[in-house]
Amino acid sequence: MRADGRTESTASTRPVRPGGADSAGASRPALTLFDSSSCDRILIVGAGGFGRELWHWLQAADGAVPARVAGFLDRDPRRLDGKGLDRPVLGDPATFQPAAGDGFLLAIGIPGVRRAVASDLLSRGGRLVSFVHPTALVAPTARVGAGTIICPLAIVSDAVTLGRGTLVNYHASLGHDAATGDFCVLSPNAALGGHARLDDDVFLGLSASVGPGKRIGARSKVAANSAALADVPADTLVVGVPGRCSPLVDKSA
């Protein structure tokens, strides 16, 4: 990790080859975990609904990957009570001390919280890992940042760049040459047109869209079923079709 807290380029982004192989041509398991080969154990950060979804998707992985998932981190030690999962909550991410060889998957759906929790874990020596679900379509020219999660049936098209800690939820899509900054969240069915750009910490709601070549400023939100068809400044809420902009009052969520 560099002094500014970012991972080095060889770990923060790497091209992905669809059809079960990475850019070096090596076969990959049903579920791809980048930068995890030296992880002795994997911990899911967040034991809410998305964390439980991640747990079930991880079970599709071949070999030792499911066995290396040691458990969850969550503020509520009883968060998984009655959920039928056979992994425990091992601690609070705010105080958990990573061991050498720990890798962390961010199961958090709010950009600012993803960033804060990741930064806290990184400051204590933690390491983010990324995964791509086997049903996602990721172009071989795409570059995927460390800590990124690409969910079932997502599409990451030609020459797309995903920043660190980005979440591409199921059925979300990014057209050719689109890009995200760090810790962006694309909710289910959200879509970026070709050459569209999200700056850091942008949130796209359910079925939200960004027009081709348009840019969304840092920490902005495009509401569910809304369409951003023009550039959007930072700290802005976009609602409607076409999207109407207003200042984002609550920047913490």
Image (cartoon, helix red, strand yellow):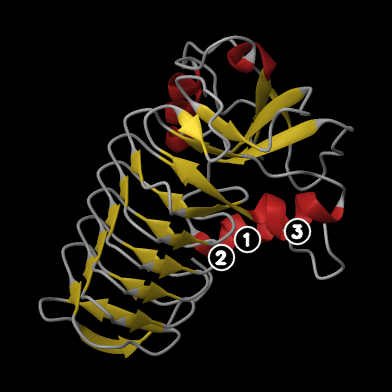
Lower sequence index among marks 1 and 3: 3
Asked which secondary structure carries label 1, the reply is: helix
Give the number of the mark in front: 2 or 1: 2
* Residue 212 seen in the current view: yes
Residue designated by label 1: 115
Amino acid beneath label 2: Asp
Give the number of the mark in front: 3 or 2: 3
Residue designated by label 2: 182
Graded by Cα atoms within 10 Å as few (under 14), some (14 to 19) or many (20 or more), the crowding at tag 2 reads: many
Kindly identify the residue that appears in the image at 20 percent across and 75 percent down: 211
- Residue 160, position as x, y percentages in the image: 40, 61
Q: CA distance from mark 2 to mark 1?
A: 8 Å
Amino acid beneath label 3: Glu
Lower sequence index among marks 3 and 2: 3
Amino acid beneath label 1: Arg
- Residue 187, position as x, y percentages in the image: 32, 53
237 vs 36, left or right, is left
- Residue 130, position as x, y percentages in the image: 58, 41
Asked which secondary structure carries label 3, the reply is: loop
Residue 175 image-quadrant placement: bottom left
- Quadrant for the N terminus in the image: bottom right
Kindly identify the residue that appears in the image at 44 percent across and 36 percent down: 50
Residue designated by label 3: 8
Foreground of the two, 123 or 113: 123
Kindly identify the residue that appears in the image at 11 percent across and 81 percent down: 242
Foreground of the two, 171 or 157: 157
Residue 227 image-quadrant placement: bottom left
The answer to whether the residue labelled 2 contacts the one labelled 1, judged by CB atoms less than 8 Å apart, is: yes
